[in-house]
Image: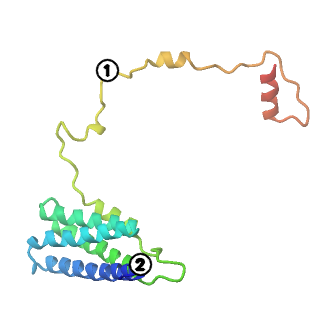
Amino acid sequence: MNTATDIWDEFVSRGVLDCDTLLGGIQQLMSETLHRDALPEMAYISFSLATQSLLLGAELLGRLATTVERCFALLYEGQLDPSSALPLLASGIDTMGKGFSELHAADKSGARIEKTPLDAAIYELETLYPLPANDDDTLQILRPASKAGPDVLLGRLAQNVKKPEIPSKPVPRDKNTTDASIAVTADAD
């Protein structure tokens, strides 16, 4: 029977190997020795890394692997330009591999990723995502919902605002009086 430590070690080692496999595939795609039909298999490897990472509590690695998987799918669908996407994918996968390596080198206080910028890699890859088409069903958030105006008239809102009361007589001041105590004294009158 495998212990939790054995499962963790296998997960981390497999993550490093899978990242190396994905990087090799990216290099072959860049040199055109690998056909784009290999992209679904590369997406599957990324998806597998994502699910394992999320299940074992390595959330940022899981998010990065999910982002890598989505990029592979978009590449396969022809929605990303390979000349700009492949170098960024290689960078993101390299970062993911460094994250797995950092988990592998855990100290007595536990395994964690502190030095590898996973959030930056996720952001970098998400900038590749295509924007939705500009038709009637998309980008509604950029258009006003109605041109009729607000539901509540601004005059009604202004009627409910309480005006501050100004004291009619001056408040006496001495050398120990602060502006805050003047306001309290004025409210008490």
Q: Quadrant of residue 22?
A: bottom left
- Which amino acid, mark 2? Ala
- Circle 2 residues within 10 Å: few <14, some 14–19, many ≥20: few
Q: CA distance from mark 2 to mark 1?
A: 61 Å
Q: Residue at x 26, y 67 (%)?
A: 68
Q: Which residue is mark 2?
A: 4
Can residue 93 be seen here?
A: yes
Task: Name the side, left or right, on which 56 lies relative to 168.
Answer: left
In the rendering, at what x and y percent does residue 77 appear?
Answer: 12, 60
Residue 70, placed above or below residue 114? above
- Circle 1 residues within 10 Å: few <14, some 14–19, many ≥20: few
In the rendering, at what x and y percent does residue 85 appear?
Answer: 21, 67
Can residue 121 be seen here?
A: no
Tell me which label, 2 or 1, sits earlier in the chain: 2
Quadrant where the N terminus lies? bottom left
Q: Which mark is residue 22?
A: none
Task: Name the side, left or right, on which 50 lies relative to 158.
Answer: left
In the rendering, at what x and y percent does residue 103 appear?
Answer: 42, 79
Q: Which mark is residue 148?
A: 1
Q: Residue at x 9, y 81 (%)?
A: 33
Give the camera-side residue of 159 and 106. 106
